[in-house]
Image (cartoon, rainbow, N blue to C red):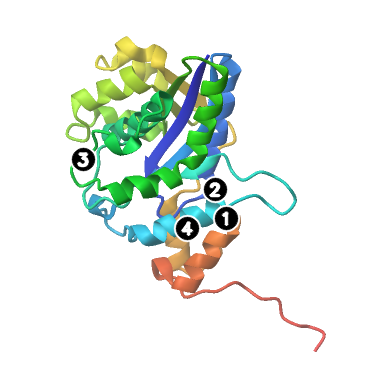
């Protein structure tokens, strides 16, 4: 049995309900195979160094993700989300390729499995001890799960796997977007769970793209049959028009956007008129 930690990267500008729904679909698909158990998921927003037009500062995107994912346990006893925020990529001054993000989190897991000092990781030169300690707190949930596994199994197999949409897979074929060695490493060393829509043909892409075809067994293709075209781009446009975005993203995120006047929105929560007056 292989234990999986799903990692999804992106701008999350802003985070939507569908971003989080991807994790649920991927977990269901992996469990159905009988080969995997999913320990958790990590949402890794890009840094401000990505320089994408309209990209909000990471401090806002991080805060919205915290609100979307929730903190602690709910008052009715329902446990907090198994999907967690990872800020290692977001706080870096420069953009970090996806492969390096996966490498980083796999190193952290390997250190946990070996029960070694995580501060001794061979990370980038600017990764200071204070940052290591801060991230160790952020990954405390994962360290606890790994410790429980080590208590039950002598050598548990815990691996990172990339979670993405079909558009990311298709971008492998776009010249200049990916380094060849990164594409091979992602598919060969980590594997992917790719969510696609009805009518698309990711199987054909994997079959015809020679660079990754030898590792097609490591690519899990999942079709999202409940088609939903909610995107961050659509939400930003809707906010700029001061139209409602309710039920497209979590209410606490909407409240944060309104309170901070993000994405050009000047709206606020609609209030019912007191018709009794």
Q: Going from the N terminus, do you reach mark 4 or mark 1 first? A: 4
Q: Going from the N terminus, do you reach mark 2 or mark 4 first? A: 2
160 is higher (above) or lower (below) than 126: above
**Outermost top residue:** 214
Return the mark for residue 250. Answer: 1
Measure the alpha-carbon separation of dots 4 and 1. Answer: 9 Å
- SS of the residue at dot 1? loop
Q: In front: mark 2 or mark 4?
A: 4
**Residue nearest the viewer, comparing 169 with 101:** 101
Q: Going from the N terminus, do you reach mark 3 or mark 1 first? A: 3
Kindly identify which residue carries mark 2.
17
Q: Going from the N terminus, do you reach mark 1 or mark 2 first? A: 2
Are the residues at dot 2 and dot 3 in contact (C-beta closer than 8 Å)? no
Q: In front: mark 3 or mark 1?
A: 3
Q: Position of residue 213 (x, y in %)?
A: 31, 13
Q: How crowded is mark 1: few (under 14 residues within 10 Å), some or many (20 or more)?
A: some
At a point 26% along the width and 50% down the height, the residue shown is 92
At a point 46% along the width and 31% down the height, the residue shown is 6
Measure the alpha-carbon separation of dots 3 and 1. Answer: 35 Å
88 is higher (above) or lower (below) than 185: below
Return the mark for residue 11. Answer: none
94 is higher (above) or lower (below) than 277: above
């Amino acid at each position: 049995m292989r234990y999986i930690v799903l990692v999804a990267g992106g701008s999350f500008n802003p985070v939507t309900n569908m971003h989080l729904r991807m994790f649920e679909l991927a977990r269901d698909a992996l469990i159905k195979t009988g080969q995997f158990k999913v320990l958790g998921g990590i949402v890794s927003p890009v840094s401000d160094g990505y320089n994408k037009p309209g990209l909000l500062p990471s401090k806002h995107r991080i805060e919205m993700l915290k609100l979307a994912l929730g903190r602690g346990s709910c008052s009715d006893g329902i446990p907090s989300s198994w999907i967690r925020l990872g800020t290692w990529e977001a706080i870096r001054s420069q953009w970090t390729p996806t492969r390096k993000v996966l490498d980083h989190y796999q190193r952290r897991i390997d250190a946990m499995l070996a029960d070694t000092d995580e501060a001794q990781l061979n990370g980038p030169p600017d990764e200071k001890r204070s940052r290591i300690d801060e991230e160790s707190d952020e990954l405390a949930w994962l360290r606890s799960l790994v410790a429980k596994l080590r208590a039950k199994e002598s050598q548990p197999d815990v691996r990172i796997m990339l979670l993405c949409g079909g558009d990311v897979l298709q971008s492998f074929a776009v010249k200049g977007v990916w380094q060849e060695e990164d594409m091979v490493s992602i598919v060969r060393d980590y594997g992917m769970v790719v969510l696609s829509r009805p009518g698309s043909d990711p199987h054909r892409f994997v079959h015809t793209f020679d660079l990754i075809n030898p590792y097609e067994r490591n690519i899990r293709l999942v079709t999202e049959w409940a088609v939903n075209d909610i995107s961050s781009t659509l939400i930003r446009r809707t906010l700029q028009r001061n139209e409602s975005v309710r039920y497209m993203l979590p209410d606490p995120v909407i409240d944060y956007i309104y309170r901070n006047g993000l994405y050009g929105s000047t709206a606020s929560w609609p209030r019912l008129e007191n018709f009794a007056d």
